[in-house]
């Protein structure tokens, strides 16, 4: 006997069929989840989820400056041009120590002999041949001289010649591919011009300082016989002696020589020898082995109303002659004590330093015209200068 079913449009309910469908569904879900976790672990980028990202920092950098267009107010171009030619100079010499005849002193301290003394300064390479310009007081009396370049190369230096009266010296080293400084024109300097001082102060390493030209033609400082200093407020300290004073184009204007200081450090008053003077010394030493200067054999003095009255001379400007060397060029030309030299070779002389420089520039053995005031008369005198004797002992500084 068959059971009757009602056809109502649905699949007839069967518990066995539903159980199979549920089992199939659960297996499919399980397989999908397993596949998802496998993919998420091995290939996280496929599912758009990766490992936690570490925070990053993006640095902002200024665009590189064009080398042809220096930054306004910067002296870096001048420093790059001049600094390689500025060197550090180290000297050493044996200094004798006083011996004592006291036996107890010799017992405790031994027989005192000599000790080594070192010095430090700077210099400027001025030719590819290895010539170096520096101060005479940097190398004076040195037994050994070592030069250190800005690229750390070292070389022993020999002294080609010295000129104590301007405190300049010429050294020479033997190295290849030497940087050379460009010589500027110190005669075109004006007060207020910006300058840089380059050297090795206190041995800390090459240092560049900036300032302005404070004054020109400084003399009567008691530093050298011939003084015509450039004064600057660029910081100059011990160890800068012999270094370079350059303009904002990196051209050499002078050789840093001395400072005015109460503490031994910079107080904003430094002095440099003009490159025009240094050029004359260099050419004389390299060509002749020494600097040849004119000399007339007089003792000059600054003209004052008291001296003018004493010698009975009617002059308010010029240099008064207080002494004349017997048989010297001035005496042979008829110059007497009490004469006032007004001009040398057509150039007015209003101070002792100007007279010394004017006479030194004369060529020995060649006639030179002097304008002299004697009493109330103005005379034209022809003098044949001789050669200035070498300075036997450098002035105390």
Image (tube, rainbow, N blue to C red):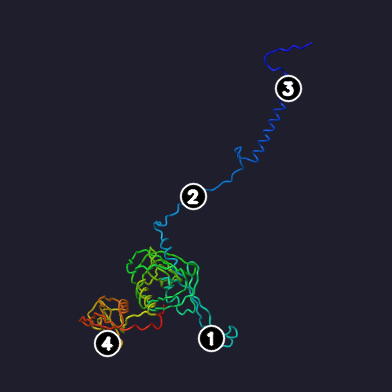
Residue 364, given in percent of the width and then of the height, sits at 31, 82
Is residue 310 something one can see in this rendering? no
Q: Quadrant of residue 159?
A: bottom left
Q: Nearer the viewer, mark 4 or mark 1?
A: 4
Q: Quadrant of the N terminus?
A: top right
Circle 3 residues within 10 Å: few <14, some 14–19, many ≥20: few
Q: For the point 61% across and 38% down, which residue is it?
A: 46
Per the model, the C-alpha gap separating discs 4 and 2 is 80 Å
Per the model, the C-alpha gap separating discs 1 and 3 is 126 Å
Label 4 secondary element:
helix
Q: Quadrant of the C terminus?
A: bottom left
Q: Quadrant of residue 160?
A: bottom left
Asked if labels 2 and 3 touch by Cβ distance under 8 angstroms, the answer is: no
Q: For the point 34% across and 82% down, which residue is it?
A: 388
Please tell me the numbered disc located at residue 332: 4
Please tell me the numbered disc located at residue 99: 1
Is residue 103 something one can see in this rendering? yes
Q: Which residue is mark 3?
A: 17
Residue 245, given in percent of the width and then of the height, sits at 40, 68
Looking at the image, is mark 4 or mark 3 earlier in the sequence?
Answer: 3
Per the model, the C-alpha gap separating discs 4 and 1 is 51 Å
Q: Nearer the viewer, mark 4 or mark 3?
A: 3
Label 1 secondary element:
loop
| Residue 172 placement, left or right of 19 | left
Residue 89, given in percent of the width and then of the height, sits at 47, 73
Position above or below: 153 against 395: above
Looking at the image, is mark 3 or mark 2 earlier in the sequence?
Answer: 3
Residue placed farthest to the right in the image?
A: 1
Circle 4 residues within 10 Å: few <14, some 14–19, many ≥20: some
Q: Which residue is mark 2?
A: 60
Q: Nearer the viewer, mark 3 or mark 2?
A: 3
Per the model, the C-alpha gap separating discs 1 and 2 is 69 Å
């Amino acid at each position: 006997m068959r059971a009757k079913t009602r056809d109502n449009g649905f699949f007839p309910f069967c518990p066995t069929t539903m159980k199979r469908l549920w089992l199939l569904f659960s297996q499919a879900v399980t397989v999908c989840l397993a596949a998802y976790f496998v993919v998420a672990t091995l290939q996280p980028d496929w599912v758009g989820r990766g490992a936690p990202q570490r925070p990053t920092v993006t640095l902002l950098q200024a665009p590189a400056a064009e080398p042809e267009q220096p930054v306004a107010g910067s002296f870096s171009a001048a420093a790059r041009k001049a600094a390689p030619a500025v060197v550090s100079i180290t000297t050493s010499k044996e200094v004798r120590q006083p011996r004592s005849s006291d036996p107890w002193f010799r017992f405790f301290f031994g027989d005192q002999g000599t000790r080594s003394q070192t010095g430090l300064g700077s210099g400027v390479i001025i030719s590819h041949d290895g010539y170096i310009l520096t101060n005479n007081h940097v190398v004076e009396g040195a037994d050994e001289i070592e030069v250190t370049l800005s690229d750390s190369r070292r070389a022993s230096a020999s002294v080609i010649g010295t000129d104590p009266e301007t405190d300049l010296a010429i050294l020479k080293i033997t190295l290849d591919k030497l940087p050379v400084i460009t010589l500027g024109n110190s005669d075109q300097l004006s007060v207020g011009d910006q300058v840089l001082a380059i050297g090795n102060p206190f041995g800390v390493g090459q240092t560049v300082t900036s300032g302005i030209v404070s004054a020109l033609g400084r003399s009567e400082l008691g530093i050298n016989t011939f003084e015509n200093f450039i004064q600057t407020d660029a910081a100059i300290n011990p160890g800068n002696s012999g270094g370079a004073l350059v303009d904002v184009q990196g051209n050499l204007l002078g050789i840093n020589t001395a400072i005015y200081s109460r503490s031994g450090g910079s107080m904003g008053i430094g002095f440099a020898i003009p490159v025009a003077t240094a050029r004359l010394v260099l050419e004389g030493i390299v060509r002749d082995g020494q600097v040849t200067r004119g000399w007339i054999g007089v003792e000059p003095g600054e003209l004052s109303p008291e001296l003018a009255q004493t010698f009975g001379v009617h002059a308010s400007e010029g240099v008064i002659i207080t002494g004349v060397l017997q048989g010297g060029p001035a005496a042979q030309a008829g110059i007497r004590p009490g004469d006032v030299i007004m001009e040398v070779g057509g150039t007015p002389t209003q101070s002792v330093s100007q007279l010394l420089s004017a006479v030194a520039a004369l060529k020995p053995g060649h006639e030179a015209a002097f304008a002299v005031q004697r009493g109330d008369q103005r005379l034209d005198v022809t003098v044949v200068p001789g050669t200035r004797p070498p300075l036997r002992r450098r002035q105390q500084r």
